[in-house]
Image (tube, rainbow, N blue to C red):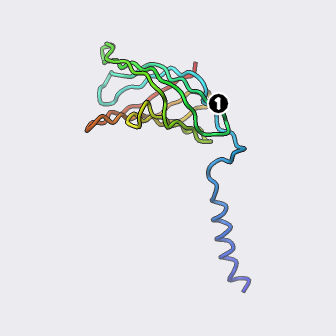
Amino acid sequence: MRIRLLPTVLASALALAGCGDGPTASEQFPSVQGTYDVSAPIHEAPGARFTGTITVVDDSRTTSQFSGTYTLTLLAADGTKRGGYTGELVEAGISSKGSVQFDLGTNSFRWRGTLGEVGNMNGTWILVDGASNYTGSFVAVAR
């Protein structure tokens, strides 16, 4: 009887060990606080890019959420300014492993990436504009 219970006990123990993938309240999230200089090329328009700043307010390292603002300029391939954009970061968060995500203004402009060891971020973005999608990568260098 003891041998028959072993697989059940082992399976239960393994299932419990897999629970709790997220950090507990006492765990620390990486600090993402600061101002970042951003460069974000647009894959569908070679040479065109967004440039500007993202400022992050990260009041607590015991929660994954943060807030902030952005100021971006759209530059054409020839360097001509095509538009300026400012607003709030929404749906912003960081994982305990340094994965970051935030949307610029709405969930139509999504940014996903990683916080590096020196505090810089890099990743990808997508802008959904009606029937069109625009994509790119980004590098955000901490000041």
- Give the quarter of the image for residue 48: top left
- Which residue occupies 64% across, 39% down? 63
Q: How far across and how far down the image is residue 99, in percent? A: 55, 39
Count of numbered circles in the view: 1
Q: Nearer the viewer, residue 55 or 3?
A: 55
- Which residue occupies 63% across, 58% down? 19
In the depicted structure, whether residue 71 falls above or below residue 109: above
What amino acid type should be assigned to the residue bearing mark 1? Asp
Q: Which residue is mark 1?
A: 59
Q: How far across and how far down the image is residue 108, in percent? A: 37, 36
Q: Residue furthest left?
A: 131
Q: Is residue 66 left or right of residue 81?
A: right
- Which residue occupies 31% across, 25% down? 46
**Quadrant assignment for the N terminus:** bottom right
Q: How far across and how far down the image is residue 92, in percent? A: 52, 36
In the depicted structure, whether residue 130 falls above or below residue 138: below
Q: How far across and how far down the image is residue 66, in percent? A: 57, 33
| Crowding near the residue tagged with mark 1, few <14, some 14–19, many ≥20 C-alpha atoms within 10 Å | few
